[in-house]
Image (tube, rainbow, N blue to C red):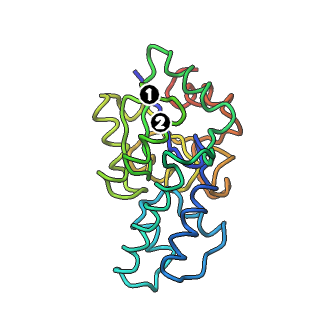
Amino acid sequence: MRLVIFDVDGTLVDSQAEIMAAMTQAFASEALPMLDRQTVLSIVGLSLTEAFAVLCPNSELAQQTRLVQAYKDAFNDLRGAGSKAELSPMFDGALDALQMLHAQDDTLLAVATGKSKRGLDKMIERHGLEGLFISQQVADFHPSKPHPAMVLAALSETGVDAGRAVMLGDTTYDMDMGRAAGVGTIGVSWGYHDVASLNADLVIDSFAALPAAIDNLTGQN
């Protein structure tokens, strides 16, 4: 068996509109000036506690804690029952790639994300992805990326050897996490970090290129 581990934000779904909207509300709740888009997106993938420590290094811990909660509240409001807007669409080809890989007898799928379990559950429900991911690793139960805990847990849960697994993501945090766990790394060019900074084993420009990249890194050519 082999294992393909997916990041979510910036890899499977384009959540920048949702992230920016929630971040704007969080900063407004503390009367702080909003940061630019590039700076905010640079922390996507980190847990919220780590993210606000990076974004607001001069703020006291108590304020950072309030910002985390304000962000969570804003994010939940944006995707609440009364919200009709689709602020985090899947990237082109993502759903087809997931379904194709899931249909392969020798391939297991997992998620390793900075989202909370609640956030991941909402994303899976929103896009009809129930049953695709055999292992779901979220920020609630692990240290923030790039710590390898999420990937190691996915390997342990599935019983797949690291040499038969790959991590797919759009940030340096994803690639560093994958390397630290000893799995192959595949970067995507459509995400939130500059491709040149990823230092991935392979970089793909579309989901159509994913199957060949997985074969390449797991020894199936």
Rendered view: 221 above or below 165: above
Does residue 158 appear anywhere in the picture?
A: yes
Looking at the rendered structure, the secondary structure element under dot 1 is: loop
Q: Quadrant of the C terminus?
A: top right
Whether residue 198 sits left or right of residue 113 in the image: it is: right
Q: Residue furthest front?
A: 82
Whether residue 137 sits left or right of residue 129 in the image: it is: left
Residue named by callout 2: 124
Neighbour tally class for label 2: few under 14, some 14-19, many 20 plus, Cα within 10 Å? some
Asked if the residue under mark 2 is in contact with the one under mark 1, i.e. CB atoms within 8 Å, the reply is yes
Badge 2 amino acid: Ile
Q: Position of residue 187 (x, y in %)?
A: 60, 45
Does residue 187 appear anywhere in the picture?
A: no
Neighbour tally class for label 1: few under 14, some 14-19, many 20 plus, Cα within 10 Å? few
- For the point 58% across and 44% down, the residue is 11
Whether residue 140 sits left or right of residue 6 in the image: it is: left
Badge 1 amino acid: Glu
Q: Quadrant of the N terminus?
A: top left
Q: Position of residue 95 (x, y in %)?
A: 60, 29
Q: Residue furthest top?
A: 105
For marks 1 and 2, the one nearer the N-term is 2
Residue named by callout 1: 130
Looking at the rendered structure, the secondary structure element under dot 2 is: helix
Q: Position of residue 51 (x, y in %)?
A: 46, 67
Structural distance between the alpha carbons of marks 1 and 2? 6 Å
Q: Using the image as rendered, state which of residue 191 and residue 32 is in the foreground.
A: 32
- For the point 50% across and 71% down, the residue is 26
Q: Using the image as rendered, state which of residue 102 and residue 159 is in the foreground.
A: 102
- For the point 29% across and 51% down, the residue is 141
- For the point 64% across and 50% down, the residue is 191
